[in-house]
Amino acid sequence: MSVLEHLERMGGVATRATLVRVCSRAAVDAALAAGDLTVLARGRYALPQAERAVLEAHRLSGVVSHLSAALSLGWSVMRPPDQPHVTVSSNRHVSMEQRRDVALHWSRLGTEDVDGMVTRADRTLVDCLRTLPYAEALAVADSAVRNGFPQARLVALALSARGPSSAAVRRVARNADPRAANPFESGLRAICHEVPGLHVEPQVSIHEGGFLGRPDLIDERLRIVFEADSFEWHGSRVALARDARRYNRFGLAGWLVLRFTWEDVMLEPANVRSALAAAVVEREHQLCHGCRSA
């Protein structure tokens, strides 16, 4: 994959060190030289959509908002936007020709909502949580709190939300977790939330007769490990050997290990959901059998 394809799978934002690890230093430097990457800060890059969004906002006398604002703020997203998101004043007339190739929003924005050409963090979060599907909204919220946005502030914003989709905002805020490693993992966790009987936590270290590992997600009651297996993190012989040893340790300790690829989570969520539901049934049966045996 190209540097941009890797960056998109990482959520649209990544550090130089991460990109160099999976793409090589030469490939990253070539992408920078070609102008294919937007520099958010020293050693931190975003997809070129972030810069394009600023240009479109300036053209339309609006501001960068929603997913485009999330990228500009350095947050990772589950699916980078195909078009830049721009918000204009609620009474602003924009012709069909002018709005072509732009995801346009109308709203009444106060000075507290905007910083320069981009909506502030508070407004960006509320906009994303109101308008995105649950999994994508959770990925944005996870990234925000992982990158320093106060979780208590997120909960307060959700509690004060009124109007359309305010219940969805509160659901995402309630489940946001800074321990989530990346949007891919957030997406898998969102699917888990749809399966009755599953109660998952991200990045929990397991110690049973020694350190077994720290999986992406676990259900401690059902003793299930869920791994979001991304080529970016597991694409070398060393990583393959390390993961094989780790999965063997979990299996020998009685944990069921379920592994899902990026394509599974992003393109086939219904199949993932079915597999998760079947795992719950199987593990519940084992628990009941254990109770009867006792």
Image: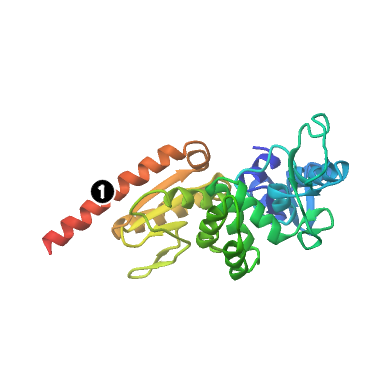
Residue 262 location (% of width, % of height): 52, 42
Farthest residue, direction left: 293
Q: Is residue 101 above or below residue 277?
A: above
Q: Where, by quadrant of the figure, is residue 208 drawn?
A: bottom left
Q: Nearer the viewer, residue 187 or 118?
A: 118
Colouring scheme applied when the structure was drawn? rainbow
**What residue sits right under mark 1 in the picture?**
282
Q: Callout 1, which amino acid? A: Glu
Q: Residue at (37%, 70%) from the top-left corner?
A: 210
Residue 248 location (% of width, % of height): 35, 54
Q: Residue at (12%, 64%) from the top-left corner?
A: 294
Q: Residue at (73%, 45%) from the top-left corner?
A: 47
Q: Is residue 284 above or below residue 213?
A: above
Q: How many marks?
A: 1
39 lies left or right of 168: right
- Badge 1 marks a residue whose secondary structure is helix
User: Which image quarter is the N terminus in?
Assistant: top right
112 lies left or right of 161: right
Residue 270 location (% of width, % of height): 43, 38
- Residue 105 seen in this snapshot: yes
Q: Residue at (73%, 51%) from the top-left corner?
A: 69
Q: Nearer the viewer, residue 161 or 213?
A: 161
290 lies left or right of 218: left
The local crowd at label 1, few if under 14, some if 14 to 19, many if 20 or more residues have their Cα within 10 Å, is few
- Residue 26 seen in this snapshot: no
Residue 219 location (% of width, % of height): 37, 59
